[in-house]
């Protein structure tokens, strides 16, 4: 489905291969993919669902001129909800690859900002990434949809989000934006962000939420404490055999402090690696 040319002196058929910039939009059913696609091409070219049944059963596209480039926006189905076999899912993703040759300039992952990120969404992202066959890093943009339902600033919410979503954001180099379909400014910003990525003008450093870090697993915490206590007990028993109880207590305390300090340093280094350099 092709859009009417927005520049009178150029027609859609005049587009050279280098002018066409594919933008692939992926995400879970109900995350607002089609609504976002309509905003990017400024029209109602994609059917928008209102229930749990998908309106998009196969990939479709619409195009629009933005200056000297032709934006080709591809709306994709949630392949995990279409009762496809693994081979059919692979064929659908191969179709996306064919539609975006020689490769998408931008891959947009839609995530609702008004609900918690789920294991199901993480599985969809990993499934598509695996079928695609190459990493999206450098081209991935996370668009938080349903921005009109958002309660807190997105930077605040991301500080406590699950490690899976933070992993996705690292794949995107922390390139994300909140999309509010009811706000004309928000719709314009979504288009501008896509253009920035296409031209290589976007830098993510200023968008990384401060103090963002994963929540450590309770199992890891308990296991670490038990290991520290066991190590201290062994050392104390050995020292008591040779130097007495008083010295053993002092040695035990020193060992505990050293091991705890090392553990804290390791945790800090791991958290710092979560942020882009």
Image: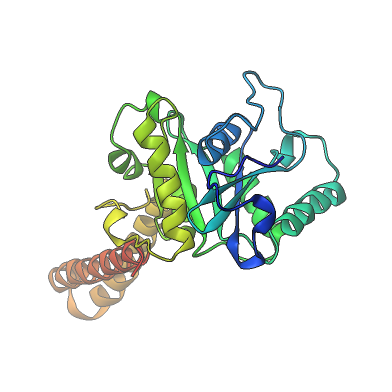
Q: Dividing the picture into quarters, in which one does residue 156 lie?
A: top left
Q: Quadrant of residue 229?
A: bottom left
Where 100 falls versus 179 (above or below)? below
- Seen in the picture, residue 17 relative to 61 is either above or below; the reply is below
Where 146 falls versus 71 (above or below)? above
Front residue of 19/251: it is 19
The answer to which image quadrant residue 129 occupies is: bottom right
* Residue for point 38% across, 43% down: 189
Q: Is residue 28 left or right of residue 179?
A: right
Depth check, front residue: 103 or 44: 44
Instruction: Inspect this view and state whether residue 170 appears.
Output: no
Quick check: 133 left or right of 167? right
Q: Position of residue 124 (x, y in %)?
A: 64, 45
The scheme the figure's colours follow is: rainbow
At 25% from the left edge and 52% from the top edge, which residue is drawn? 211
Residue 44 percent across, percent down from the top left: 60, 29
Residue drawn at point x = 46 percent, y = 43 percent: 143
Residue 61 in percent (x, y) is at 68, 43
**10 displayed left or right of 257:** right
- Is 214 rendered above or below residue 186? below
Q: Nearer the viewer, residue 179 or 125?
A: 179
Kindly give the residue lying farthest to the front in the view shown.
Answer: 9
The quarter of the image holding the C terminus is bottom left
In the image, residue 32 lies at what x, y percent?
55, 32
Residue 91 shows in this picture: yes
The quarter of the rendered structure image containing the N terminus is top right
- Pick out the residue farthest to the bottom: 242
Residue shown at 41%/54% (left/top)? 175
Total numbered labels: 0
Q: Residue furthest top?
A: 51
């Amino acid at each position: 489905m092709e859009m009417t040319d927005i520049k009178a002196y150029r027609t859609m058929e005049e587009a050279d291969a280098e002018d066409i910039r594919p933008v692939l939009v992926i995400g879970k059913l109900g995350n607002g993919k089609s609504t976002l696609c309509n905003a990017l091409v400024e029209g109602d070219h994609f059917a928008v669902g209102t229930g749990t049944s998908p309106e998009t059963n196969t990939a479709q596209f619409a195009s629009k001129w933005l200056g000297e480039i032709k934006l080709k926006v591809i709306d994709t189905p949630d392949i995990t909800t279409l009762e496809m076999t693994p081979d059919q899912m692979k064929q659908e993703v191969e179709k996306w690859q064919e539609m975006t040759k020689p490769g998408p300039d931008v891959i947009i992952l839609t995530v609702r900002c008004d609900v918690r990120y789920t294991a199901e969404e993480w599985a969809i992202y990993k499934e598509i990434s695996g079928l695609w066959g190459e990493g999206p890093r450098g081209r991935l943009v996370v668009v938080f949809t349903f921005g009109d339902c958002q309660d807190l600033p997105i930077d605040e919410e991301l500080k406590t989000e699950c490690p899976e979503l933070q992993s996705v954001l690292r794949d995107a180099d922390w390139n994300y934006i909140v999309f509010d379909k009811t706000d004309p400014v928000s719709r314009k910003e979504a288009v501008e962000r896509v253009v920035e990525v296409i031209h290589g003008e976007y830098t993510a450093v200023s968008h990384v939420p401060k103090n963002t870090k994963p929540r450590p697993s309770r199992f890891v915490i308990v296991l670490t404490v038990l290991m520290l206590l066991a190590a201290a007990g062994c050392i104390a028993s050995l020292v008591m055999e040779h130097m007495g109880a008083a010295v053993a207590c002092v040695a035990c305390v020193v060992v505990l402090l050293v091991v705890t300090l090392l553990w804290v340093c390791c945790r800090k280094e791991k958290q710092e690696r979560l942020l882009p350099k």
